[in-house]
C-alpha cells in the first residue's frame, strides 16, 4: 500500500523560469517526509512535480527523473490520471467541492474511477471518514454541504477524499497553514495514523510541525529572488534539527534567516 | 463601526471649507488651533457630532430612490397594460384565452391569444433546444480548452454577434437563410415525414423552423458569454482537487466546473429565453404569420405574440390596439412565470451555493 519515491536531478520550470534546480531525494515507503524552507524556494513546486500536478499550469515542465517503485512517473506512455490516483494530494487551502455534500465529496474520486455500487461507496465513505478522524463529527449529516464544515473539518474531509481512492503516496502542501492550532493537532495525529498505510510527503512552514511529525526532513532554499530553489540538506529529522551539516540549514532552523 | 466614516468625512469637509468645525476637535486642549497642533484623525478632544445631512445620507437616498424606481416602473407598466387590455377583452365576442383567430378590428371583435401564445412558446423552446447545447460547448471551449490567444478574439466575435440588431437578423433570415432552410426542410420531410413535426406537403421555408433557427443564432451569444463567465469563475483549487483525484480534463469539468456553474447557466438560459420570447421583428420577418395551432415546424406558418403586434399594430383601431396590448400582457405573464421558475430552481440548492463562499 505504500511505495518508494525517487527523484534524481529534478528541475522544474514555469516557462523559461527555473523554479527548482536539480533536486535528488529518496522517500521510503511508510515514512513522513517534511519539506521546509523559506517562501518561494520551490518546496511546493517540487511536491506538485511528484504527482504531475505541476504540468497543469501552462508552460510548466520538468527535467530529470522521478520514479515510483522504479517506474518512471514521467514516461510518455504513462497515463497521467493513473499517476495522480496513485499519488494523492491535499492542498494548502481546504478545497471540498462546493456543490457536493460531505458524502459526495468523499466518494468523488471513486465515482470518477467508475465505482457505482452504492454499498461499495457507502463503505468507502465510512472507512475514509473514520481514517480521517471525521466520522463521528459528520456521520449524522453526510448529506449536508461539505463546504459548511469548519476549516479544520474541511481539511480532514479533503484528506478523506484523497485517501478514499487508496493511493500509495499522499502529498500534503502546507495542509495546516489555514487552520487553528487545535485543528492542526488533529491533522498531525491523523498523519501518524496514516503513516501505517501511506508514504507521506508534507510541505510545511512550521518547523515545530516538521520536527514533530516527520521521519526525514528536506531543507530547500534560494540564494536570492529569481534564482532556482535547491535542496540544501536532506537527512533524518532528528539530525536536521539537532546537528545539521549545512550552515544554511542551521541558520534557518535557529531563526537567523528566512 | 458605522459611525467612523461619517465622522471622518465631517472633519474633512470642515477643514476644507475653513469653517470653525475644527473647534470640535480642538476643544479642551486650550491651545489656539494651528495646523501643527491639530489632533490626529484618530481623535483627541471631544467626540465630534454625527453629521445630519452629508454625502452619506445623500448617497443612501439616491440608491433607495433608484431601487424604488424599478418598482414604480413595473407597476406603471402593469397598470398601463391592464387598463388598455381589460376594455378590449370585454369587447371580445369569443373566449380570449382559447379562440384561435385574430379579428379585433371588426364591428364585432373576435380574437384569442391561443395561437400566438403557442407559437411564441414553441419557437422559443426550439430556439433554446438548438442554441443551449452549442452555447455551452462554445463556452467550455473558450473557458477551458482554447489557448488564450484564440479564446480572447473568439469571445470578442461572439459578443459582437450579440450586438447585431434583430432587424438585420430578420432580413438575413428572410433573404439568405430561408433557402437553405427550405432545402433542409424538404430533406427532413422526405426522410422523416413519419415524425409529425416534419410531416406535411409544403410549401416549406417561412416556417417555425426558420424563425426558431434565427432566434437560436440570436440567443446563442447571450447564453455563451454568460456561461463562459461562470465557467471561468470556477475556483482553480476545485479544478485542481478534481485533477489530483485522477480526473481527466472532461471529468474535471463534469466534477468541478459544470456543477459550480449550473445556477449561472440556468440564469443565462433564462435570459436567452427572455430574449427569444420577446423577439419581435426577426420573427415577424421570418415566420409565416398564420393563425392555426400546428406542431408541424417545417411547413410555412407560425406566429408569435410579439411578431403579431408588430404586424397588426399599424392597421389596428382602438379595440384592435387594446387587443394587442392584452396579448402583450399575456407575454408579460409568460416571461414572469419563466423567470420565477428559474429563480425557484436556483433557490433550491442555495444552501450549497452560500456555503461555498
Image: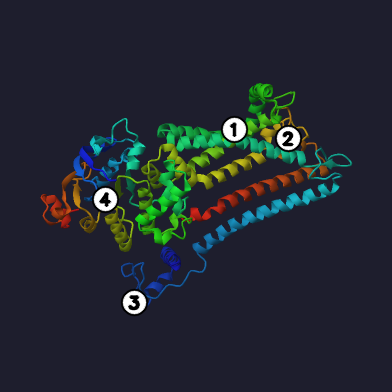
Q: Identify the coloring.
A: rainbow
Helix, strand or loop at mark 2: loop
Residue at image mark 4 = A202
Pick out the residue farthest to the front.
A119
Residue at image mark 1 = B217
Chain letter of the residue carrying label 4: A
Measured Cα–Cα span from mark 2 to mark 3: 81 Å
Q: Disc 1 or 3, which lies upstream in sequence?
A: 3
Measured Cα–Cα span from mark 4 to mark 3: 59 Å
Q: Work out whether A214 lies above or below A2.
A: below
Chain letter of the residue carrying label 2: B
Measured Cα–Cα span from mark 1 to mark 3: 73 Å
The answer to whether residue B87 is left or right of residue A146 is right
Helix, strand or loop at mark 1: helix
Label 2 environment density (alpha carbons within 10 Å; few <14, some 14–19, many ≥20)? many
Residue at image mark 2 = B303
The answer to whether residue B1 is left or right of residue B206 is left
Q: Would you say the residues marked 4 and 3 are in contact, meaning their CB atoms lie under 8 Å apart?
A: no
Residue at image mark 3 = B29
Residue B26: name its quadrant: bottom left
Amino acid at each position: 500500500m505504500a511505495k518508494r519515491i525517487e527523484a534524481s536531478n529534478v528541475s522544474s520550470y514555469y516557462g523559461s523560469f527555473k523554479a527548482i534546480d536539480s533536486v535528488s531525494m529518496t522517500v521510503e515507503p511508510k515514512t513522513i517526509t517534511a519539506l521546509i524552507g523559506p517562501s518561494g524556494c520551490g518546496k511546493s513546486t517540487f511536491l506538485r512535480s511528484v504527482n504531475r500536478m505541476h504540468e497543469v499550469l501552462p508552460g510548466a515542465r520538468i527535467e530529470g527523473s522521478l520514479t515510483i517503485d522504479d517506474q518512471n512517473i514521467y514516461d510518455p506512455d504513462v497515463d497521467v490520471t493513473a499517476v495522480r490516483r496513485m499519488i494523492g494530494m491535499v492542498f494548502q487551502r481546504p478545497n471540498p467541492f462546493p456543490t457536493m455534500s460531505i458524502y459526495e465529496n468523499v466518494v468523488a474520486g471513486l465515482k470518477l474511477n467508475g465505482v457505482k455500487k452504492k454499498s461499495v461507496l457507502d463503505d468507502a465513505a465510512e472507512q475514509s471518514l473514520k481514517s480521517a478522524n471525521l466520522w463521528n463529527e459528520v456521520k449524522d449529516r453526510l448529506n449536508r454541504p461539505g463546504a459548511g464544515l469548519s476549516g479544520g473539518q474541511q481539511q480532514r474531509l479533503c484528506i478523506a477524499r484523497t485517501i478514499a481512492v487508496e493511493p500509495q503516496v499522499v502529498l500534503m502542501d502546507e495542509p495546516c497553514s489555514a487552520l487553528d492550532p487545535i485543528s492542526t493537532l488533529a491533522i498531525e495525529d491523523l498523519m501518524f495514523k496514516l503513516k501505517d498505510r501511506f508514504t507521506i510527503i508534507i510541505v510545511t512552514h512550521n518547523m515545530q510541525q516538521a520536527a514533530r511529525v516527520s521521519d526525514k526532513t528536506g531543507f530547500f532554499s534560494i540564494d536570492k529572488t529569481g534564482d532556482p530553489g535547491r535542496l540544501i540538506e536532506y537527512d533524518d529529522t532528528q539530525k536536521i534539527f539537532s546537528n545539521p551539516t549545512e550552515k544554511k540549514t542551521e541558520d534557518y532552523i535557529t531563526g537567523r534567516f528566512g | 463601526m458605522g459611525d467612523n466614516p461619517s465622522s471622518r468625512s465631517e472633519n474633512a469637509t470642515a477643514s476644507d471649507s475653513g469653517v470653525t468645525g475644527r473647534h470640535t476637535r480642538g476643544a479642551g486642549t486650550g491651545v489656539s488651533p494651528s495646523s501643527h497642533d491639530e489632533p490626529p484623525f484618530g481623535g483627541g478632544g471631544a467626540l465630534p457630532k454625527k453629521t445630519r445631512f452629508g454625502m452619506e445620507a445623500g448617497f443612501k437616498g439616491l440608491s433607495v430612490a433608484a431601487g424604488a424606481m424599478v418598482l414604480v416602473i413595473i407597476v406603471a407598466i402593469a397598470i398601463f397594460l391592464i387598463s388598455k387590455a381589460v376594455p378590449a377583452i370585454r369587447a371580445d365576442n369569443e373566449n380570449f384565452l382559447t379562440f384561435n383567430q385574430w379579428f379585433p378590428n371588426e364591428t364585432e371583435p373576435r380574437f384569442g391569444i391561443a395561437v400566438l401564445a403557442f407559437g411564441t412558446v414553441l419557437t422559443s423552446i426550439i430556439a433554446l433546444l438548438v442554441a443551449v447545447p452549442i452555447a455551452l460547448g462554445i463556452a467550455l471551449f473558450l473557458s477551458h480548452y482554447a489557448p488564450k490567444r484564440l479564446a480572447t478574439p473568439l469571445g470578442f466575435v461572439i459578443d459582437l454577434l450579440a450586438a447585431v440588431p434583430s432587424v438585420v437578423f430578420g432580413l438575413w433570415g428572410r433573404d439568405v437563410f430561408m433557402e437553405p432552410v427550405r432545402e433542409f426542410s424538404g430533406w427532413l420531410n422526405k426522410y422523416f415525414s413519419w415524425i409529425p413535426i416534419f410531416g406535411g406537403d409544403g410549401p416549406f421555408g417561412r416556417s417555425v423552423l426558420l424563425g426558431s433557427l434565427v432566434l437560436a443564432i440570436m440567443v446563442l451569444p447571450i447564453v455563451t458569454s454568460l456561461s463562459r463567465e461562470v465557467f471561468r469563475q470556477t475556483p482553480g483549487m476545485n479544478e485542481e482537487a478534481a485533477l489530483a483525484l485522477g480526473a481527466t480534463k472532461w471529468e474535471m469539468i463534469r466534477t468541478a466546473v459544470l456543477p459550480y456553474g449550473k445556477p449561472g447557466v440556468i440564469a443565462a438560459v433564462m435570459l436567452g429565453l427572455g430574449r427569444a420570447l420577446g423577439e419581435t421583428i426577426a420573427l415577424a420577418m421570418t415566420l409565416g404569420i398564420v393563425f392555426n395551432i400546428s406542431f408541424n415546424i417545417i411547413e410555412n406558418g407560425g406566429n408569435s405574440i410579439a411578431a403579431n403586434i408588430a404586424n397588426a399594430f399599424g392597421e389596428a383601431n382602438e379595440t384592435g390596439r387594446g387587443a394587442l396590448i392584452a396579448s402583450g400582457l399575456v407575454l408579460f405573464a409568460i416571461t414572469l412565470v419563466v423567470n420565477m421558475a428559474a429563480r425557484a430552481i436556483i433557490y433550491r440548492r442555495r444552501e450549497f451555493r452560500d456555503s461555498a463562499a
